[in-house]
């Protein structure tokens, strides 16, 4: 078996985090800000001092939720039949490509 490369794959740090009201907490927001990630989280309705919130950017969260919903309609992804991570990720890429192609072909 060939030896694996010692070079680490660079992982990009996200600039923003889209989350729902369940993640609205001072400690969570502070930890994100300390890492240079701007939180886009709507404030709880009972917050004494409401945080500034960017509704325009938060709209994109709905698109992400719909995409996960469509991917989970694929039985193989929802049940996670693949035991090997590479197989699961490969099928996930195929399913996402299929969704993208369907929307791309219909738009043309």
Image (cartoon, grey):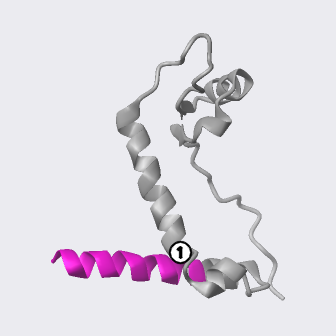
Left or right of residue 3: residue 14: left
Residue, x 62% and y 86% (percent of image)? 75
The magenta stretch spans which residues? 91-108
The reply to whether the magenta stretch includes residue 30 is no
Counting from the top left corner in percent of width and height, residue 100 is at 37, 75
Q: What main secondary structure does the magenta stretch of the protein show?
A: helix
**Camera-side residue: 55 or 33?**
55
Please tell me whether mark 1 sits on a helix, a strand or a loop. Answer: helix
The percent position of residue 23, horizontal first and vertical second, equals 66, 36
Q: Quadrant of residue 46?
A: top right
Q: Which residue is mark 1?
A: 71
Taking the image as shown, residue 62 lies to the left or right of residue 84, namely left
Q: Position of residue 48 (x, y in %)?
A: 62, 11
Q: Residues within 10 Å of mark 1 (few under 14, many from 20)?
A: some
Viewer-proximal residue among 11 and 47: 47
Q: Residue furthest toward the left?
A: 108
Side (left or right) of 88 relative to 61? right
Q: Is residue 91 above or below residue 104?
A: below
Q: Residue at x 58, y 41 (%)?
A: 20
x then y, percent, for residue 70: 49, 73
């Amino acid at each position: 078996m060939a030896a694996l490369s010692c070079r680490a794959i660079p992982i990009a740090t996200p600039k923003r985090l889209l989350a729902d009201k369940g993640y609205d907490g001072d400690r969570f927001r502070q930890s994100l800000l300390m890492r240079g990630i701007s939180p886009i989280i709507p404030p709880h309705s009972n917050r004494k001092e409401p945080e500034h919130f960017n509704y325009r950017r938060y709209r994109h969260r709905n698109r992400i939720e719909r995409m996960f919903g469509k991917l989970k309609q694929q039985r193989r992804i929802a049940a996670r039949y693949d035991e090997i991570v590479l197989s699961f990720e490969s099928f996930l890429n195929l399913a996402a490509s299929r969704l993208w192609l369907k929307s791309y072909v219909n738009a043309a």
